[in-house]
Image: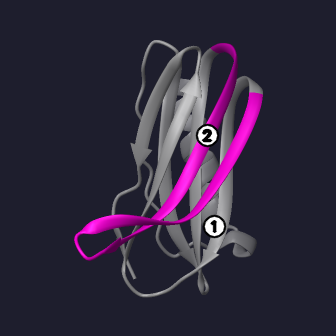
């Protein structure tokens, strides 16, 4: 597990430091369970686009999926503006997409499914 956390930290450091993907703000919220080693969602900003990312790593090979939603807080509730899905059989899956930025409070929300388990992750709220 420690190796995966170190690897995830190194990958995120490289992504943040790479000019092609120079993210101004980024947050990660990994967690764990009996099927999942970790899962989480994040949201960042690159130029005039939100960068939305969700991932999970598994303890064994499973068919798994992520349904990721970009949501905006409007009139006291979270409204889904865009939904993306990724499927894979293996030790994990991730999804990364961009969306034109506009003012407001935003988050990435995701359903992670594998091995009969469903987990939910949220990025921290992102004020733009």
> In the rendered image, which residue does mark 1 sit on?
17
Look at the image and say whether residue 43 sits in the magenta stretch.
no
97 in relation to 110, above or below: below
**Which stretch is magenta?**
60-88
- What element does badge 2 sit on? strand
Q: Residue furthest left?
A: 76
Mark 1 to mark 2: distance in Å?
A: 26 Å
Image quarter in which the C terminus is found: bottom left
Q: Is residue 29 visible?
A: no
Please identify, in this view, whether the residue under mark 1 or under mark 2 is nearer the observer.
Answer: 2
**Residue in the image at 41% along x and 66% along y:** 79
- What element does badge 1 sit on? helix
Which is the main secondary structure of the residues drawn in magenta?
strand
The quarter of the picture where residue 16 lies is bottom right
Look at the image and say whether residue 83 sits in the magenta stretch.
yes
Colouring convention used in this rendered image of the protein:
one colour
- Percent across and percent down for residue 122 are 40, 50
123 in relation to 106, above or below: above
Q: What mark, if any, has residue 124 been given in the picture?
A: none
**Residue in the image at 56% along x and 51% along y:** 68
Q: What mark, if any, has residue 66 been given in the picture?
A: 2
Q: Badge 1 local density, few (<14 within 10 Å), some, or many (20+)?
A: few
Position of 88 compared to 8: left or right? right
N-term-proximal mark, 1 vs 2: 1
Position of 2 compared to 57: left or right? left
């Amino acid at each position: 597990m420690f190796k995966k956390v170190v690897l995830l930290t190194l990958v995120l450091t490289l992504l943040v430091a790479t000019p092609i993907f120079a993210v101004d703000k980024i947050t990660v919220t990994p967690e764990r369970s009996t099927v999942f080693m970790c899962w989480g969602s994040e949201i960042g900003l690159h130029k005039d686009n939100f960068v939305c990312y969700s991932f999970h790593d598994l303890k064994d090979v499973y068919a798994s999926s992520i349904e990721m939603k970009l949501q905006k807080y409007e009139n006291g509730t979270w409204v889904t503006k865009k939904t993306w899905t990724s499927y894979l059989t293996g030790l994990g899956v991730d999804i990364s997409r961009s969306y034109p930025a506009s003012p407001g409070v935003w988050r990435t929300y995701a359903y992670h499914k594998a091995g009969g388990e469903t987990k939910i992750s949220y990025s921290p709220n992102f004020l733009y």
